[in-house]
Amino acid sequence: MTKHQIEVITSVERRRRWSREEKEQLVAATFEPGACVSEIARSAGIHVSQLFRWRKELCQISAPSVPQLVPVEVVEALPAPLTSAQPLPISRPRKKSMVTIELGGARRLRVESDIDSEALGRILDVLERR
């Protein structure tokens, strides 16, 4: 006659509820120098992936949201105020046109054709890095 060990489960095992403070303490421990995330998770009785999920969720809350792109209008600098001693400047009206630059990813940049090329270069450098 062979004896077999049988495990009888008499109740439904409930999930443990972790308070925000407990989660924050465990996540903070993972950022300590020399910390091992798997050891921290094991000591708390949770799976490593759960600890990484908490870490991601808590870090996203404190991280600033991605800034939205705002339309920018480039205008010429205002001229210095005229005094009675200065003659009125004579200027010819220039025909302005818009230039559309396709940046890819359904992004476009529209600028006037007389934009300062150095300023446009700086704008394009910033947009390339995104």
Image: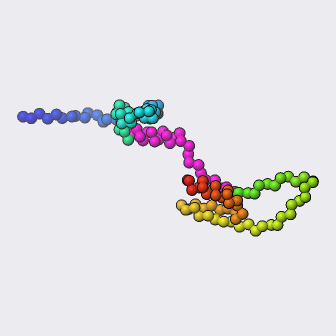
Q: Residue 19: in sight, yes or no?
A: no
Which residues make up the magenta segment?
Answer: 50-73
- Horizontal placement of 71 versus 43: left or right? right
Q: Nearer the viewer, residue 36 or 60?
A: 36
Q: Nearer the viewer, residue 17 or 98?
A: 98
Task: Examine the rendered structure and indicate whether residue 97 appears above or below residue 42.
Answer: below
Which image quadrant is residue 53 in? Answer: top left
Residue 85 in sight here: yes
x then y, percent, for residue 20: 46, 33
Magenta span contains residue 57: yes
Q: What residue is rendered at 60% in x and 53% in y? A: 126
Q: Residue furthest left?
A: 1
Magenta segment: does it hold 70?
yes
Give above or below for 9 relative to 84.
above
Image location (x, y in percent) of residue 49: 38, 41
Q: How is the image coloured?
A: rainbow
Residue toward you, 34 or 25: 34
Vertical placement of residue 60 versus 71, above or below: above
Q: Is residue 52 left or right of residue 97?
A: left
Residue in the image at 63% along x and 53% along y: 70
Instruction: Determine the residue positioned at 40% across, 33% down.
Output: 35
> x and y percent of residue 79 in the render?
81, 55
